[in-house]
Amino acid sequence: MTIDPPIYEWTVGDAQEAETVLKAAGNLIDAHLMTLDPSAPFPKSSVRRGTPVGLTIRLDLGPILAAIREAQESHQHGEDVTPPAETASDVTA
């Protein structure tokens, strides 16, 4: 039996999405590792260290640094740089 392994790729646009994707990747790894020892309540350290996984992360902090510079410049000019408050539609359960 041949199994074509899934390869996941995500593209995110903000810090919240990045954190969510990183957690999702960790959860996918854990779910697959659990199949190696289904009687264990969580993947053992020896299983984690002994199981190869391919992972590539490209992290572009350029937009964040640009926002920091912009906020600093606005602050120096006395402008209000407080981010807008979350609305009810921004909050998820």
Image (cartoon, helix red, strand yellow):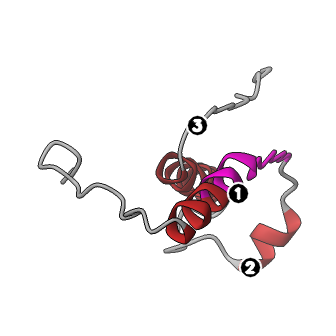
Check disc 3 and give the amino acid type: Val
Identify the image quadrant of the C terminus.
bottom left
Which of the two labelled residues, at mark 1 and mark 2, occupies the earlier sequence position? 2
Check disc 1 and give the amino acid type: Leu
Instruction: State the SS at label 1.
Output: helix
Q: Residues within 10 Å of mark 2 (few under 14, many from 20)?
A: few
* In this view, the mark in front (2 or 3): 3
Q: Which residue is mark 2?
A: 45
Which quarter of the picture shows residue 44?
bottom right
Position of residue 26 measured from the top left corner of the image (x, y, whole percent):
61, 57
Check disc 2 and give the amino acid type: Ser
Q: Residues within 10 Å of mark 3 (few under 14, many from 20)?
A: few
Q: Is residue 93 left or right of residue 78?
A: left
Instruction: State the SS at label 3.
Output: loop
Looking at the image, the residue that sits furthest to the left is 88
Determine contact: label 1, label 2, CB under 8 Å.
no
Q: Residue at x 75, y 48 (%)?
A: 62
Q: What residue span does the magenta drawing correspond to?
A: 54-67
Mark carried by residue 65: 1
Position of residue 71 measured from the top left corner of the image (x, y, whole percent):
55, 61
Which quarter of the picture shows residue 4?
top right
Q: Which residue is mark 3?
A: 12
Looking at the image, the residue that sits furthest to the bottom is 45
